[in-house]
Image (cartoon, grey):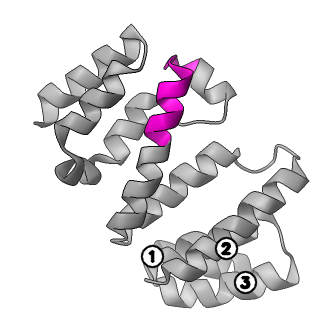
Amino acid sequence: MTKLNQALDLFHEKKYEESLALFLEISKTKPSAEAWFNVATSAVLAGNTELGDEALALTLNLSEKEQSGEFLPQGMIKFYFLLALIDGGATEKAIGLINKYKDIFSELKITDDYFLQMRGLPFLGDFLEKTRPLYIILGKEWLRELAANIDAEGKDLVEQYIKANF
């Protein structure tokens, strides 16, 4: 079994500190956006948000340089990092990042899945579902602010989400 497979197995078993050690070793011998992304998410889930932030910065830097299309777009890298922050209990950092996504969706206005996918962003419906734990803190007013700044399709989706969850 390769070190990567071993690290991934440990990660899926929620043994984040052990997977982190292996991912760090891998990322130092074969640095890539994907390798450092594994460090970022493992670190956050192991409770080390400082290392997670550093690894995320390296991930984004390398993904910009690699531009091979083989790894995730930066918008999705940040989205999955946001989910790791939520799962790791780093709520304050997660709220900072989710607010950046609200700004992005508001600036784009268009929430069509294909439009968002072409820009390397999560689908709005997936985004709402997977970031649900934060809405207990942010409240439906946060969602209404988002809805006020996006297209009719997105507004309807957000309103349905509010009705179903509040």
Label 2 – label 1 distance at C-alpha = 13 Å
Q: Is residue 108 magenta?
A: yes
* N-term-proximal mark, 1 vs 3: 3
Residue nearest the viewer, comparing 150 with 48: 150
Residue nearest the viewer, comparing 1 with 40: 40
Our reading of the magenta stretch's main secondary structure is helix
Residue 34 percent location from the top left of the image: 73, 63
Residue at screen point 47% across, 57% down: 82
**Quick one: label 2, few (<14), some, or many (20+) residues within 10 Å?**
many
Q: Which element carries disc 3, helix, strand or loop? A: helix
- Which label sits on residue 3? 3
Q: Which element carries disc 2, helix, strand or loop? A: helix
Q: Is residue 13 above or below residue 147?
A: below
**Quick one: label 3, few (<14), some, or many (20+) residues within 10 Å?**
few
Residue 117 percent location from the top left of the image: 62, 28
Residue type for callout 2: Ala
Q: Are marks 2 and 1 in contact (CB under 8 Å)?
A: no
Numbered disc in front, either 1 or 3: 1
Residue at screen point 87% across, 47% down: 67
Residue type for callout 3: Lys
**Residue holding disc 1:** 45
Q: Is residue 139 above or below residue 36?
A: above
Q: Quadrant of residue 62?
A: bottom right
For the N terminus, the quadrant is: bottom right
For the C terminus, the quadrant is: top left
* Bounds of the magenta segment: 101-114
The residue lying furthest to the top in this view is 152
* N-term-proximal mark, 2 vs 1: 1
* N-term-proximal mark, 2 vs 3: 3
Residue 61 percent location from the top left of the image: 79, 61
**Residue holding disc 2:** 55
Residue type for callout 1: Leu
